[in-house]
Amino acid sequence: MEYVLLIYNSEERWNALDQAQEEQIMAAHYALMEKTKADGVYVGGERLTDTPMATTVRNHGGKITVTDGPFAETKEQLGGYYVLDVPDLDAAIAYAGMLPHGDLGSVEIRPVFSM
């Protein structure tokens, strides 16, 4: 079953990291990507741009509205994601626990609804 690991963090705190801290976190991401590829569970994943680059589209009763930014006010923003094809939620949780988000945020796990 495919699960998406949604990585939420504080953009403010991320942007305050020094280069060495950022490189350490990114190295951990690259290592996890290689592990999930070697384990045969990696489907995809990317880092996202900061929320000022986001656009939200809503369709209410046929009226389309477009607004700048993310869909909700929050202290943590969606910063990236992994899509993994693992046997069950426990496996997805195990990989999420390997993510180097530390105290910068959290990881939300959702099954992918296959159309």
Image (cartoon, grey):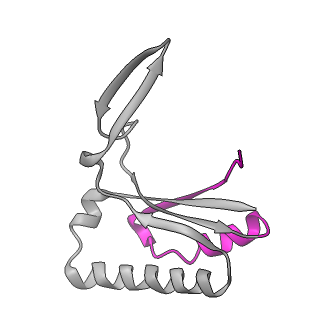
* Camera-nearest residue between 84 and 29: 84
Image quarter for residue 89?
Answer: bottom right
Q: Which residues are magenta?
A: 87-115
Residue at x 31%, y 44% (from the top left corner): 54
The residue most toward the front is: 115
In the displayed structure, 8 sits above or below 33; it is above
Residue at x 29%, y 66% (from the top left corner): 14
Residue at x 29%, y 78% (from the top left corner): 22
Residue at x 43%, y 66% (from the top left corner): 46
Image quarter for residue 82?
Answer: bottom right
In the displayed structure, 1 sits above or below 56; it is below
Image quarter for residue 69?
Answer: top left
Is 51 in the magenta? Answer: no
Quadrant of image for the N terminus: bottom right
| Left or right side of 42 for 21 | left
| Residue 62 at x, y percent in the picture | 47, 13
| Residue 39 at x, y percent in the picture | 67, 84
Is 91 in the magenta? Answer: yes
In the displayed structure, 100 sits above or below 15; it is below
Quadrant of image for the C terminus: top right
| Residue 10 at x, y percent in the picture | 34, 57
Q: How many marks do you count on the picture? A: 0
